Amino acid sequence: MKKNLLLGLMLCFCATMAMAQGNNANVTQTGDDTRVDIIQTGATNDVLSTINGNTTTLGVNQTGNGNRLNSVIDGSNTDAVIEQIGDANEVQQTIAGDNVQSFIMSEGSQNVVAQTISGNDNSADIIQVGDLNTVIQVQDGPNNSFTSSSVGNSNRITSDQIGENQSVLISQTGDGNLGVFTQTSVSNSIEVLQEGNNNAVTVSQDGQNNIAGFGETQLTQIGDDNQMSSLQQGNGNSSFGLQEGNGNTTSLDQRGDTNSIQSTVTGGTNVTNITQRNQ
């Protein structure tokens, strides 16, 4: 009698553990020629996917414990790939439009991605390696592109693009770095490089054909605790900034058309304020 009771308790315990550690996938597909591939290895991982469109592909790989994906794709000819390796990573994704290519990879723990893309021909690449990194991305309009890489811990990127043919490229290596970007209108571009800890870059552009960092002359921070801001309103403006050292502050402000700033700071606790107007 005791043996049977013990066996029953063990079976109940095992069943409870299995239920507690189970993964979950809930997928709804509406349309033609859609494909969903999901691989989950670990415990308490969760996928909630809704696809409404044609010729759309979603690939998901979650390895670890407590990872979560909520993906809503409303459009056609869209490919999305999400890979989360580690524990308690989360992706919230909403895509509406055609020909959107989205790739998200998080390797570590407690990384967060919130992605919203509306429009045509958009592309987004997000890579997070480390813990507690965050990317918040909103794109609204055709031909936008966003590429980000965060290697370290507690880095944060916020991007908001409204318009056509805009692009953002940011690379973060270190801990506690921040990038905040806003672009409105047509054919603007931002490129940012951060290497170190607790650096911050803020860029706001409104107009056409404005550039904040490009190629080898990116908005660059190498060191710790640097602050840089670039504001451009108008058309055809360009700003390039380099901070190499610690605790530097640079403010670049241009309003009007075809203004140009190039700022280079080497050392520590330097302050630079540049304002240009031609209107």
Image: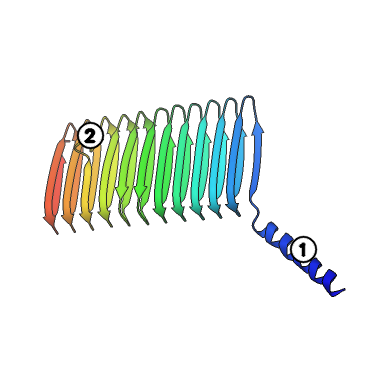
Instruction: Pick whichever of labels 2 and 1 is earlier in the sequence.
Output: 1
Which residue is at a point 42% across and 43% down the rendered structure image?
A: 137
Amino acid type for the residue under numbered disc 1: Leu
Q: Position of residue 108 (x, y in %)?
A: 44, 53
In three-dimensional space, the C-alpha distance between marks 2 and 1, rounded to whole angstroms, equals 62 Å
Q: Is residue 226 visible?
A: no
| Between 199 and 165, the one nearer to me in the picture | 199
Residue behind mark 1? 11
Q: Which mark is residue 23?
A: none
Mark 2 secondary-structure assignment? loop
Which residue is at a point 64% across and 27% down the rendered structure image?
A: 31
| Between 134 and 183, the one nearer to me in the picture | 134
Residue behind mark 2? 215
Can you say whether 53 is above or below 240 in the image? Answer: above
| Between 259 and 41, the one nearer to me in the picture | 41
Q: Is residue 17 visible?
A: yes
Q: Position of residue 174 (x, y in %)?
A: 30, 54
Furthest-front residue in view?
3
Q: Position of residue 4 (x, y in %)?
A: 84, 69
Counting every numbered tag in the picture gives 2
